Image (cartoon, helix red, strand yellow):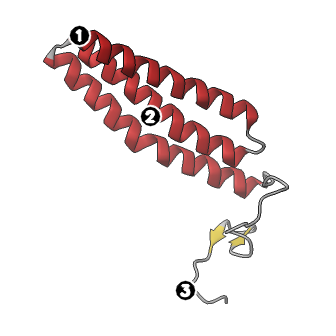
Amino acid sequence: MSDIIIGILATLGTLFVLLAAVGVIRMPDTYLRISVTTKAATLGIGLILAAAAIYFNEISITSRVLAIILFILLTAPVGAHLIGRASYFIGVKLWSKSLIDDLEGKYKKSTHELKSEGTEED
């Protein structure tokens, strides 16, 4: 029974990692590529690691796998946010068919400051 669960988790994880790789190639701009890799690859790696924890069935390996999954879940969104923000600051263009630029008019290029909705301009 555990072999079936391991096979399902490993296969699903591999498919999500494959979809992330295809998404990196297919997405038209940097911001969409960041979104694909953060979501699909994180889930794929988590599923593959869960399959490894079940396969080895040892408390030391399971605790390491849980620590790695937690680390990935905490760091992947933060890293993606920082890459996206840096890309916007250096002027990487949005996809031509993007409808909304949420930061338009809120970013001051000379000081790299972002203004929120509630702050007044000087």
Name the residue tied to disc 1: 56
Expressed as whole percent of the image width and height from the top left, the position of residue 73 reads 39, 40
Q: Residue at x 62, y 71 (%)?
A: 114
The total number of labels drawn is 3
User: Label 1 sits on what residue type?
Assistant: Phe
The image quarter in which residue 109 lies? bottom right
Expressed as whole percent of the image width and height from the top left, the position of residue 29 reads 76, 45
Find numbered disc 2 in the image and state the secondary structure of the residue it sits on. Answer: helix
User: Label 2 sits on what residue type?
Assistant: Leu
Q: Residues within 10 Å of mark 1 (few under 14, many from 20)?
A: few
Expressed as whole percent of the image width and height from the top left, the position of residue 56 reads 23, 10
Q: Who comes first in sequence, dot 3 or dot 2? A: 2
Q: Residue at x 67, y 34 (%)?
A: 23
Q: Quadrant of the N terminus?
A: top left
Name the residue tied to disc 2: 43
Find numbered disc 1 in the image and state the secondary structure of the residue it sits on. Answer: helix
Name the residue tied to disc 3: 118
Q: Who comes first in sequence, dot 2 or dot 1? A: 2
From this view, report whether residue 103 is shown above or below residue 70: below
Q: Is residue 42 left or right of residue 99?
A: left
User: Label 3 sits on what residue type?
Assistant: Gly
Q: Is residue 85 left or right of residue 69?
A: right
